[in-house]
Image: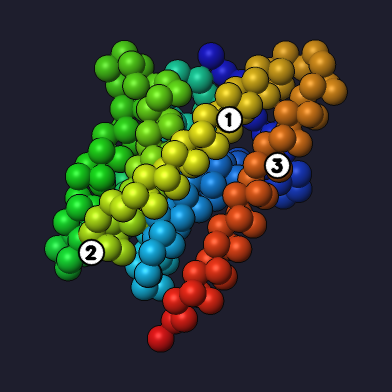
């Protein structure tokens, strides 16, 4: 099944088609949200800036680049058309290599709790996006766990090598937001595919934009608050 997604709201309206597809494949709003969730985990207590940046880079590369590249060439649908499979997979593997290199550095430095989280995320990355095991893990639960819960745990683990009560509370919030995000997104895609009710399409699109902005602005505000509480050295 093939469906064109170059008209999506997060895809640039100007520029060469390959450029627009390249940016669109990153699904920047959703990538930003997951990256923010990882940052939430890092901000759950005292934090070190380089580790916060590291977990942000890890999730941006893992979700924004690797996962979406694999989804573009490995999923049943081909929303971006026929792509150069070898090049796309090479980009995915290269990005994933950087991700694991950064993660393993902190694992062996002083954050071993990050290791099982990374293994779990790696499993979901391949199982979900390549629809392995008959697509059994290509579902809402997998998305909530890998996008909404584990990123918060990873953010905490890289800072403190632990999962605190505050981390669990934050992960509940992020999980609920992820559920709302993916259910709204799926309804939006279905409406967009049929192009029947333009008013409903616009309404769902607006909701997705509000969720994205709310998470990004909320994360920035959380960061400022933590800096006030725990001034950087």
| Residue appearing at x 23%, y 64% in the figure | 106
Above or below 85: residue 104? below
Which residue matches tag 3? 209
Q: Which label belongs to residue 180?
A: 1
| Residue appearing at x 72%, y 35% in the figure | 207
Identity of the residue furthest to the right in this view:
199
Residue 222 visible within the image? yes
| Residue appearing at x 41%, y 73% in the figure | 49
Relative to the observer, which residue lies in front, 118 or 99?
Answer: 118
Q: Which label belongs to residue 106?
A: 2
Asked whether, in this view, residue 221 is left or right of residue 57, the answer is right
SS label for mark 2: helix
Number of the front mark, 1 or 2: 1
Label 1, label 2: how many angstroms apart (C-alpha)? 32 Å
| Residue appearing at x 45%, y 23% in the figure | 140
Q: Position of residue 43 (x, y in %)?
A: 43, 62
Relative to the observer, which residue lies in front, 173 or 49?
Answer: 173
| N-terminal label among 1 and 2 | 2
SS label for mark 1: helix
């Amino acid at each position: 099944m093939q469906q064109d997604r170059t008209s999506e709201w997060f895809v640039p309206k100007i520029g060469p088609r390959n450029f627009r597809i390249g940016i669109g494949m990153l699904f920047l709003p959703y990538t930003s949200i997951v990256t923010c969730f990882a940052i939430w985990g890092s901000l759950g207590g005292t934090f070190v800036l380089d580790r916060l940046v590291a977990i942000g880079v890890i999730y941006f590369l893992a979700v924004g680049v690797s996962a979406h590249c694999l989804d573009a060439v490995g999923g049943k649908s081909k929303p971006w058309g026929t792509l150069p499979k070898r090049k796309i997979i090479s980009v995915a593997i290269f990005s994933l290599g950087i991700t694991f290199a950064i993660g393993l550095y902190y694992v062996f430095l002083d954050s071993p709790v990050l290791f099982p989280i990374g293994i779990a995320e790696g499993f979901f990355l391949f199982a979900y996006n390549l629809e392995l095991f008959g697509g059994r893990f290509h579902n809402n639960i997998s998305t909530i766990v890998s996008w909404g819960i584990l990123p918060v745990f990873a953010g905490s683990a890289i800072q403190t090598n632990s999962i605190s009560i505050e981390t669990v509370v934050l992960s509940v919030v992020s999980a609920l937001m992820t559920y709302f995000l993916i259910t709204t997104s799926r309804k939006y895609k279905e409406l967009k595919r049929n192009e029947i009710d333009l008013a409903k399409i616009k309404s769902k699109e607006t909701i997705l934009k509000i969720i994205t902005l709310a998470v990004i602005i909320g994360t920035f505000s959380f960061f400022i608050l933590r800096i006030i509480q725990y001034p950087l050295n």
